[in-house]
Amino acid sequence: MKTAVVLLPGLNRDRDMIAALTKISGKAPVTVWQTDTEIPDVDLIAIPGGFSFGDYLRCGAIAARSPVMRAVAEKAAKGVQVIGVCNGFQILVEAGLLPGALMRNSSLKFVCREVKLQVANANTAFTRNYAPGQIIRAPIAHHDGNYFADDETLKRIEGGGQVVFRYAEGTNPNGSINDIAGIINTNGNVLGLMPHPENLIEAAHGGTDGRGLFESALGIPSRQAA
């Protein structure tokens, strides 16, 4: 499968994402810049984490209005898989590709540590290699990861199986409502999550729990990392 990674000023996890996709798919992703208005034919588009445009205004607010995000939205509307991690999640929300909002952590502090995630929906293109309810480890690094949605939106995404990951075993680091760590759109092809699965895909990282997400998205049978 062909992949692409979106590059924006201020992102600092792009190399991590490129390395993960290269290692798992066996082929380096193409990269697209903020001013690009077209994205080549690919099967998966990834928006990495970091601090796009210095988190000016709101996290992801400026990036969401860049030309490349219009191209991402067009690809998503055609069914191309899109994943946004950390700042990428914030960008997808600001772009209207995912519902809700991401606010300051309830502690008002930046958090950087490992958490546990529960796979709340294993019946998605991004989680099919996990078991329902499986607990996995994942690193986080964010200041604005507190997911919020109004009552109507929350009822809709909970009822529609759009909550894909939840913080588990009391590890919610930011106060997210219903322990929500990652959600998917109604069509099932756009995923946003705050934790960084790309930083836990091989033994050198201390574990491979994040690998299943990329293998799922790329249609690769689950296997132990070398």
Image (cartoon, helix red, strand yellow):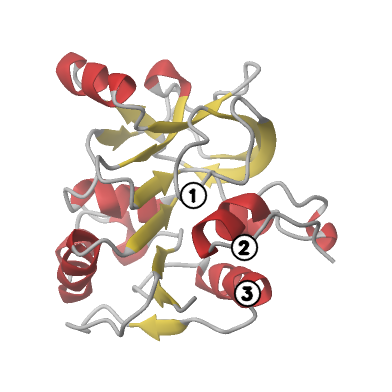
At horizontal 55% and vertical 23% (from top left) the residue drawn is 172
Q: Nearer the viewer, residue 94 or 111?
A: 94
Whether residue 81 sits left or right of residue 204 in the image: it is left
Q: Quadrant of residue 42?
A: bottom left
Is the residue 5 above or below the residue 211 in the image? below
Per the model, the C-alpha gap separating discs 1 and 2 is 11 Å
Q: Amino acid at mark 2?
A: Ile
> Up-down: is 33 above or below 75?
below
Q: CA distance from mark 1 to mark 3?
A: 18 Å
Disc 2 residue crowd, few under 14, some 14–19, many 20+, Cα 10 Å: some
In the image: residue 138, left or right of residue 94: right
Type of amino acid at the residue the image marks with label 3: Ala
Is 37 left, or right, of 120 in this rendering? left
Gap between marks 2 and 3, in whole Å?
17 Å
Q: Secondary structure at mark 2?
A: loop
The image shows residue 136, relative to residue 198, as above or below, that is above
- x, y percent for residue 198: 61, 59
Residue in the image at 42% along x and 65% along y: 46
**Residue 120 in picture, x, y percent from top left:** 50, 27
Which residue was labeled with disc 2? 220
